[in-house]
Amino acid sequence: MVDHVLSAPRPDFLRKPTLRGDGVLLRPVTVDDVPELMPMFRDAEASRLTGSHADGEPDEARIRTWYETRRDQDDRLDLAVVEQPTGKVIGEAVLNDWAPGNESCSFRICLVPGTYGHGLGTQATRLIVGYGFEKLGLHRISLEVYTFNPRARRVYEKVGFVAEGVLREALLWDGKRVDATVMSILAPEWFQHHGRPEVTGQAPV
């Protein structure tokens, strides 16, 4: 027997919010953030953990062009992770790969070197995932995490992501094939543990 559900209204991805937590603030990412984000693109460990194959030095001009267009995207949400109270940009959190027919998105987060281990990634993940469910009306948010990144997996589990399965040998890195674990969190699971609603979003003026 198939359960029939009413479709949620189309998510408003053009509205780029500001989300405030205790230690971090998420806001629309801009081209002005590129200088502070560049260490993230240059760091070999960040590339390994995200499975980002790159040849040579990252192209800053191309990266700037990418961030110049983020505010105009109507099918994804790219937010800068800002440390409070310093105001320093320490990474980005993204909802992308929106599947309108399934009311679902993928999620990814990356922080600049030297900012791990302080709980900021966990806070940022909670903020954007909460916004996805509470404001965008998504039903499912998913991600993939490589087996050599147990720290990230623990963060996702703290927020409520559940392991669904394994993509075997999904990544070839330095001559070794690495599995990726697929994880997701569903709207009913989020509201069961977090209530309704906790995230407050402010549209930029």
Image (cartoon, rainbow, N blue to C red):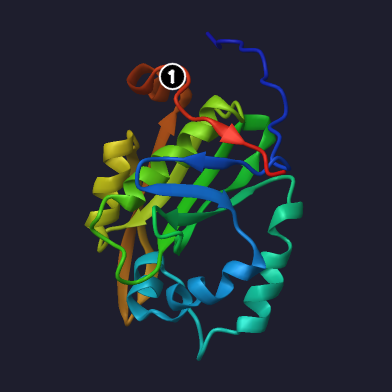
Q: Residue at x 36, y 17 (%)?
A: 192
The quarter of the picture where residue 177 lies is bottom left
Pinpoint residue 166: horizontal percent, then vertical percent.
33, 49
Residue that mark 1 sits on: 188
Front one among 97 and 69: 69
Q: Is residue 14 above or below residue 138?
A: below
Front one among 82 and 113: 82
Q: Residue at x 67, y 82 (%)?
A: 61
Mark 1 crowdedness (10 Å alpha carbons): few <14, some 14-19, many ≥20: few
Q: Is residue 172 visible?
A: no
Front one among 163 and 79: 79
Type of the residue with mark 1: Pro
Pinpoint residue 68: horizontal percent, then vertical percent.
72, 66
Pinpoint residue 89: horizontal percent, then vertical percent.
47, 63
Q: Is residue 43 above or below residue 129?
A: below
**Location of the C terminus (image quadrant):** top right
Secondary structure at numbered mark 1 = helix
Pinpoint residue 174: horizontal percent, then vertical percent.
32, 82
Q: Residue at x 32, y 81 (%)?
A: 175
Q: Is residue 71 above or below residue 20?
A: below
**Left or right of residue 75, residue 179 in this image:** left
The quarter of the picture where residue 139 lies is top right
Q: Is residue 37 above or below residue 145?
A: below
